[in-house]
Amino acid sequence: MSLVILHSDNHLLAVEKLAGLPIVPDESGDDSLFDLARSWIEVEFDKPGRAFLGVVHRLDRPVSGVVLFARTSKAARRLTDQFRERTVQKSYLGLCQGDLPAESGRVEHWLLKDRDKNRVKVCDGERAGAKLAVTSWRVLGRAAGQTLVELKPETGRSHQLRVAVASLGAPLLGDLKYGATEPLPDKSVALHAAALEVEHPTLRERMTFRAALPNGEWWGWARGIADV
């Protein structure tokens, strides 16, 4: 499996994740993005033994887009701090089944995760184990009974973007877990991490990494307007 490199330097490696590829090895035994990225580093830079690679954030397996790894322990610590302190800027594109109730908005939910079923549910309010999820959204276009939406998470909760649009009556295409009526051919969810902005861990400069929309035909009409 080929690896699309978006950026590489002494401290960072930004790559493009395909939908269906796990970030790290799991019980499936399938190739992971982590394994592919580390192998690329070892070959590209002629590294003896196992190269260091730090996982600082994740995407759900059926989601595509930008993933950033740390190539040094210093970068891993500083990037992890940025994600924890919410100074990272993330922009996602979602293709929804149906229409959203306005041109833009902000969703706040208390989410409780069922780890056995790997899904979350919306709670009426704050309760034990629930976490607040905040998402801003705006409509970019509509066609053929679908809506292209830009999603910007202000928190980093599990499945929060998928639940946000589902709660507005427009689940993501292919997201059977949260209300879509049929799967996509590749079993993906029509959610794409389009852009990620961080502060470089040593240069202290803001950097933005972008990934183009996937090749799936369902994204076809959205390609001309998905410039975020």
Image (tube, rainbow, N blue to C red):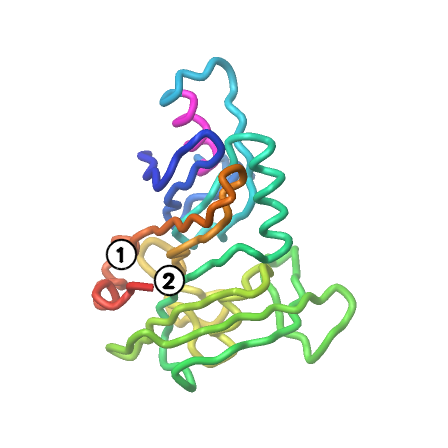
Q: Which residue is mark 2?
A: 190
- Residue name at image x 40 percent, y 51 percent: 208
Asked if 103 appears above or below 40 in the picture, the reply is below
Determine whether label 2 and label 1 are within 8 Å by CB: yes
Magenta stretch: includes residue 103: no
Q: Position of residue 68 (x, y in %)?
A: 47, 43
Q: Position of residue 4 (x, y in %)?
A: 32, 39
Q: Which residue is mark 1?
A: 216
Q: Position of residue 183 (x, y in %)?
A: 37, 63
Asked if 122 appears above or below 31 in the picture, the reply is below
Q: What type of secondary structure mainly makes up the magenta span?
A: helix
- Foreground pick, 200 / 27: 200
Q: Is residue 125 left or right of residue 74?
A: right
Quadrant of residue 188 in the image?
A: bottom left
Q: Position of residue 74 (x, y in %)?
A: 60, 33
Tell me which segment is drawn in magenta.
32-42
Magenta stretch: includes residue 40: yes
The crowd level at tag 1 (other Cα within 10 Å; few <14, some 14-19, many 20+) is few
Q: Is residue 180 left or right of residue 3?
A: right
Quadrant of residue 172 in the image?
A: bottom left
Nearest to N terminus: mark 2 or mark 1: 2
Tell me the amino acid under the disc marked 1. Gly
- Foreground pick, 58 / 179: 58
Asked if 152 appears above or below 194 in the picture, the reply is below
Q: Residue furthest right?
A: 128
Tell me the amino acid under the disc marked 2. Ala
- Residue name at image x 35 percent, y 41 percent: 6
Local SS, label 1: loop
- Residue name at image x 36 percent, y 22 percent: 44
